[in-house]
Each structure stands twice: as structure tokens, then as C-alpha cells.
Amino acid sequence: MSTKTMSAAEAAAKPASFVSSRRWLLWSGIAALCAWVLVPIYLVALGALGGRQGVYIWPKTGLPTGISLEPFILFLKTEGVVQSFLNSLGAAGITVALSILLGAPAGYALARYDFRGKDSYRLLVLLTRAFPLAILALPLTVSFIRLGLYDTIVGVGLIHTVLALPFAALVTQGIFLGVPKELEEAAWVFGCTRVQAFFKVVAPLALPGIVATAVFAFVISWNEVFAASVLTVRNRTLTAYLLTVLSESPMHYRFAGGLMLILPSVVFIFAVRRYLFAIWGISSK
Amino acid sequence: MTQNRPWIPYLLILPSVAFLALLFVVPLVQTIWLAVSDNGVPSLANAERMVTDINFTRSVKNTFLLTIVVVPVQIAIALAMGTMVAKVGRGRETILWIWTIPLGISDLAAGLVWLSILQNTGYFNSLLFSLGVIGRQASWLSYQTPVALFIAIAVAEIWRGTAIVMVIIVAGLNQVPKEFKEAAEIFGAGPWTRFWRITLPLIRPALQSALILRTVLAFEVFAVVYALGGRNFPVLVGEAYNWQNQNQNYSVAAAYAVLIMIISLAATLIYLKALKVDPERLP
């Protein structure tokens, strides 16, 4: 408050300094919010690389002293870690494949055709958003046991696809809307069949957006905790594994697990950063 | 395009409809039936067992309190981020990337991140110690400090969940035509009036979907709570998880699931009614 009244008083005297102090306020706000996001990640990385001794250093300085990769590698060698990491990759891979294979055609239909039932379909897709989807894993336990899908990566991938598919359908709709219809029609005129026109003209133009959608499907599956924990016992995904061993793990293992969960998704978000806002602009309409 | 082969769009949506029917609609019906039946006969026994459970009232209270505190703060921070970044020319991309990083972070990881800060020998205590606020390590995450634990969980949720709200709101702000603001400025509207009278009403669709998404997710809060407080802070989904995995009682777990669904649906309907969006603005 005091800085505000001060800057107002200054503004009366000389407008130039008013502008620069507002500028200063803006950038310190931005810097503070960037630190708010980044510092906790830095600190958990310190915890993951500090090992057992690092946890009990008191008081902590927050400086990267006494860290090495060794504690993290030791964590990776713990029984079950690598396997659950691979399981997570597998479940996410299935989720990506299924949600694009099932979602992209639906998105294309929504973008290019007017058909009876289009609105009901869109309602079904939007309805999934109002439900806590992961909770639907509860009754699936029984049917998955019967089908032999319980405690398998395929089972986890299937339920994660329920989470990612509505998103994929809506986003790919927007992506296909962005590909001019005229290009596709021109391909027909020049003798392409519909399928050829799609794969030769539409698909290459839509590809970057579809890849970004796939990355999101991956992140959705990678981060999901509840359904994965309910549907697996021995073939745990990384999140499910960490959740179940949490209470008996030492602190530095928990931090290492947290870091291991964060790293891949941060890389992926970086890879699709240019599409983030376009995608969410579409899917939040 | 549709005249000669009207079945094409149906063929294209069929796989996804079949998939959602099998793995969304069927489990949905199953959950409801599981919750309101006992040995195949309609009954309210599960609901009764849920309501009389020792953790029930606390978990309802905790979940609602968290949602009421977390969601508005997230919207406010996201609006602040959106307005700030709109004033930035160079460096905008980098700032937005940093702010969206938590989008890729799971609630479990967020809980573990804040555990490293708030545990007894953690960075928060170290900071307070070096500032002379506390003489020895204080604990924030035990059952003896419910308020501190609540704040810790809220902070972790705000840290993680604001990114998605920010992305939706920035996407909405990008669609607001510049002319509106300029016109308001010419007519002498100050920054606050412009924000409340021009920007906020125009991004109502974005605001609505951000609110729906975040509120539904907030009622699903679970792993972040578990990572920070173990079972010291019961929430609805955590109770469903315990009934399913520890007690092996699928029916009471289903009752919790139905309760969470009802709350989520009610919240969605309230938002849809309260923030009516002009149908012409819908896709």
C-alpha cells in the first residue's frame, strides 16, 4: 500500500518515474510468481540428490552443497522402481495410442460433418468432464478381474484412456477445423479419394497439433494416481508404487520419487509449450 | 459433403462412443448400483455405513473447506498472471512456460515437493529458524496441528493446480478484441473498471470452464493429502480408497464415489447457471 501511495505522489510530480515504478512493480510480481513455481522444484531436487544425510542437515541453507547423483541412482536400484517406471511408460503409451486412434476420427467427424446426434455426442464428451472419472475405477475392479485385465498395464491404460479420450476428441476437432476445407476439396478435384486426401493433405498439416494432443494424453496417464493404485497390485505404475510404499520409505526416497515423477512431464510440457494455449483455447470453449 | 454417404461421420465417432459406453457409462451405472444395493437388493445400508463412519463428517468438511479456499485463490492468481503477462512484450514465452510447468506435475509429486519443504528438518523450518522466529524444529504436518496441515495441503494444491486455470484464462484473454479495451480507455474507464466491466465479462466462458474443471478436480483431491499428512487429514476420495483397498468393502467405496459425483455434478450445474454463457459464443 505504502509503495502505491508513494508512487502516486511521485506521479503527480513527474509522470516518467510513475511509469517506471509501475514497470518495476510488474516485473517484481512476475519474478515472484516464477520463483513460486521454480524454487519448490529446485528444493525437492536438492532433497533427492542430498541422500540420507542431507535430510537431517539442520538448519538447511538451500544451497546445493553435498549433493551427488549417487542417492538418486541408489533409489533407482531399489526393487520395483525401474519396473514401475516401465509400467508407467507402458500405460501411458497405451493411453496415447488409444486416445488418438479413437479420438482423432471423432474430432474429424465433429469438424467436417453435420450429422444428427452431433450435439448429443458432444454432450456425452462434455459430460465426462463433470464426473470424477478416476473414481470409476472402483467398480471396474470386479469386471477387470473377470476379464483378466486386473493388475495389468492394459487395464490401467484403458481407464486412463477414458480420461484422455474426451480431451483428445475436442482438441483434434479444433485442430481439424484449423485445416482449410478448400485444400481437402482441391485434393478430391485432382482425383484423390477421401482417404488419400486425408492422409496426403490433412494429416501432415494437422500432425503437430496431434502430437501435442498425444503428449497431453501421455501426461494425463503418467500423473494419474487413484485409478492406477486401485487397479494394480503387483504391476504398479510409478505413481501407484510410490503411493503404496510412501509410509515406509525414508524421506530422501520420497523426494527422489517426486523428482522422478516431475522430470519427464516437465520435459514434455516444454516440448509442446507453443501449442499449450491454442489447445486449451479450443478445449475450454 | 454429407449427402452421398451420410454414414461416414457415424463410422468415425462409433469407436469412441463404444469405448465410452463400455468404460464410462457402464462403470457409472455399476457404481451407482453398487452403492444403493445390498446383495442385489436395493438398500441404503451402504450409505448408512458411510454416514455413520467416524471419518465421514471430517472428510466432507475437509474436502469442502479445501475446495472453497483453493479454487478462488487459484482463479485470482491466474487472473493476476494473465493480466501481468499481457503487458509483457519480450520474454512472454519464457514466463508462460515457467508458469505452466506445474501442469505436468501430478498431485502426488506436488505433495512430495512440499513435504521436502515442510518436513521437520525442511527448508521452511530452516528459514524460520534463521530468522529467529522459532527456536527449534516445529512440526506442521502432524495430527496435532490440523490448521497448519490444512494450510500446507492448500498451498501445495494452489502451487500445482493454478497452471491449468492460468492456461485457460490466458487462452480466453487472447480472444478478447483489443478494440473493447481501447474504447473503454477513450471513454475514461480506469484499469479497475476496465478489468471488472470489460475483461471479466468477456472471458466468462473461459472462467466458467476453468471453474468447472478445477472444482471437479478439487473434490477429487487425494494423493497430495496422503503425501503430506498420511491419514491425518481425511478427504472423500481418500476414504473411498481406504474402503476399497484396506477394508475391501467395495459397496461403501462406491457410496463415497456416488457422493463425490453428486457433489461434482451439483457444482457444475451451479456454475452453468450462475455464469450463463451466451449460446452464440459456444463452438
Image: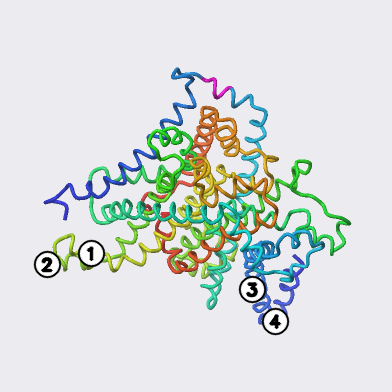
Is label 2 in a helix, a strand or a loop?
Answer: helix
Is label 4 in a helix, a strand or a loop?
Answer: loop
* Classed neighbour count for the residue bearing mark 4: other residues with Cα under 10 Å, few (<14), some (14–19), many (≥20): few
Mark 3 lies on residue: A27
Q: Is residue A187 left or right of residue A106?
A: left
The amino acid type, in three-letter code, at marker 3 is Trp
N-terminal label among 3 and 4: 4
Label 2 – label 4 distance at C-alpha: 67 Å
Mark 1 lies on residue: A199
N-terminal label among 1 and 2: 2
Asked if residue A120 shows in the view, the reply is no
> Disc 4 is attached to a residue of which chain?
A
Label 3 – label 4 distance at C-alpha: 21 Å
Q: Is residue B30 left or right of residue B154?
A: left
Label 1 – label 2 distance at C-alpha: 16 Å
Residue B175, position in %: x, y? Answer: 43, 63
Q: Nearer the viewer, mark 3 or mark 4?
A: 3
Q: Nearer the viewer, mark 3 or mark 1?
A: 1
N-terminal label among 4 and 1: 4
Q: With respect to residue B69, does B237 lie above or below?
A: above
The amino acid type, in three-letter code, at marker 4 is Lys
N-terminal label among 2 and 3: 3
> Disc 3 is attached to a residue of which chain?
A
